[in-house]
Amino acid sequence: MENIVNKILEEAKAEAKEMLAKAETSSKKQISNAKIEIEENKESLVEQARAKAERDARQNEMQAKTIAARKQSNDKQEIVSAVFNDAKAKILAMSASERKKLVDGLIKKHGRKDDKITEHDGGVILENKDYVLSLTVSDLLEHLRQEIELEVVGILFS
């Protein structure tokens, strides 16, 4: 009987030893797989971070270019405005006889016999029961600016 018990114990010990070896092998394999997965995830995360950094850099560059273009456009508009403001100042600084010629020319070209004529802002306002026509220097230059601004920009900045 003791032989049987010893044999059962030996078989149990051998089986336990084998199970322990299998568990150890399985554990080592799981640890190895986990390390591989961690490395793969690490590489993936590094690549994702690199791609995000590149996207952010491109976006920042595009924003900077947009801001620079907007500033350049605003600066050009300020220069064009200065040109038209300078023209207005020169017209308003004309001698009385030159300004009278300008006003008379405006009245002759656009006026009618029954118009009420009011001198204003270096020009005139013509009005009657049907209309009011502003031929002031400011309004005339604004109308002219709408017509020739692109041409002025081309001359100034090309």
Image: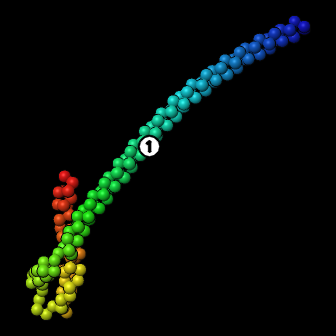
Q: Considering only vertical position in the picture, is 1 above or below 24?
A: above
Q: Is residue 131 visible?
A: no
Task: Report the residue at 80% width, 13% height from top.
Answer: 13
The one of 103 and 95 positioned closer to us in this rendering: 95
Task: Report the residue at 11% width, 92% height from top.
Answer: 113
The one of 59 and 30 positioned closer to us in this rendering: 59
Crowding around mark 1 (Cα neighbors within 10 Å: few <14, some 14 to 19, many 20+) is few
Place of residue 71 in the rendered image (x, y in percent of width and height, measured from the top left): 34, 55
Location of residue 87 (image quadrant): bottom left
The one of 40 and 140 positioned closer to us in this rendering: 140
Describe residue 23's horizontal placement relative to residue 12 as left or right.
left
Q: Amino acid at mark 1?
A: Asp
The one of 31 and 64 positioned closer to us in this rendering: 64
Q: Is residue 3 visible?
A: yes
Task: State the quadrant of the N terminus.
Answer: top right
Q: Considering only vertical position in the picture, is 50 above or below 125?
A: above
Location of residue 6 (image quadrant): top right
Q: Secondary structure at mark 1?
A: helix
Task: Report the residue at 43% width, 39% height from top.
Answer: 54
* Visual colour scheme: rainbow
Give the labeled residue for mark 1.
56
